[in-house]
Amino acid sequence: MSKKIKIVADSTCDISPELTAKYDIEIHPFVVNLGENSFKDGVDITTGDILNYYRETGNVSKTAAAPPSEYEELFRNWPSDEYDVLFFTISSEFSSAFANASLAAEKFDNIYVVESANLSTGILLVVLAAADMIESGMGAEEIVEKLKEIVPKVRASFVIDTLEFLWKGGRCSGVAALGANLLRLKPCIEVVDGKMSVGKKYRGNIDKVIPQYIRDRLDSTPHVIRRRVFITHTFENRAPVEAALKQARDSGMFDEVLETKAGCTVYSHCGPNTLGILYIEA
């Protein structure tokens, strides 16, 4: 009897409940710390809690991956005689998740730890590509090899309303944050080779910036994998999100346009009113 292939991913992939159910994906939560209090991403804390904490204290939340022992305990849920497990992590440049999970996986012969070299739904694009391959009948080792070709082609970026969260989280300098705020700049943060870099800087209100940002991103990669695209965001206001979804649909470049809201780990670093368009280049 052939073994089942189980997909497991850390919560930084920002998957929606609908996609979790549709593809039977197990999610392992990152730790989110508000001061001395620890919570599990997507389990007992919301992005609203993080925003309230910031407004009340002026501090941002901190995030952390699980230790190897916790990953080891997680992997025991899928016996090697029944399952092969594909475990997807955030880029090793952003977290110790890949290193810790890989260390734990050494004690098993059925665990394949896949580094996405990405974050948020940049990870999820890789996860769902694997789900499509499982459906086509491919085996675990074959899928892992194929994913090595896909990972470098993921195009992930976000336009950010404020650099306050990145600055206080140690991801950018105070001078850069101050300069951007004074000039009302909205930087595009791109993931390149598993690292964050600053792309084009836009000026003005975030609602007006988003259409230009999406147009620039799609114009920069005319050849894409049509299967799906994500609009991922931290907005409460629906208007800019609906406009972005429509713009992606109207481009005619994608078969499926999906919306997800960033979870607590990603929100901790980007803050409110962030939006990204994420897809795979052909």
Image: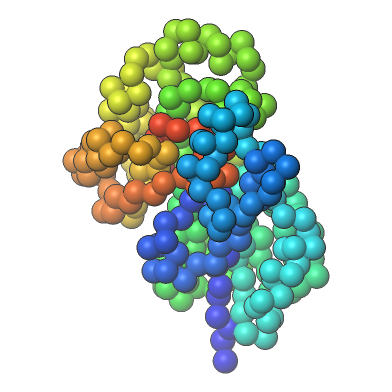
209 with respect to 105 (left or right): left
Quadrant of residue 5 within the rendered picture:
bottom right
Please tell me whether residue 100 is drawn above or below residue 211 in the rendered image: below
Q: Viewed as shown, does residue 154 lie left or right of 6? A: left
Name the residue nearer the viewer: 279 or 207: 207
From this view, report whether residue 72 is shown above or below residue 216. below
Colour logic: rainbow
Tally of numbered discs: 0
Q: Position of residue 32 (x, y in %)?
A: 64, 46
Q: Is residue 174 visible?
A: yes
Residue 253: image location, x then y, percent: 26, 44
The residue most toward the bottom is 1
Q: Quadrant of residue 221?
A: top left
> Seen from this angle, which residue lies furthest front?
56
Q: Residue at x 69, y 46 (%)?
A: 37
Q: Position of residue 144 (x, y in %)?
A: 59, 62
Considering depth in this image, is 10 or 129 the residue closer to the camera? 10
Residue at the spot 46% in from the left edge and 55% down from the top edge = 15
Res 152 visible: no
Q: Residue at x 55, y 39 (%)?
A: 50
Question: Which residue does the image show at 48% across and 23% down from the upper left?
Answer: 162
Quarter of the figure with the N terminus: bottom right
Q: Position of residue 256 (x, y in %)?
A: 28, 54
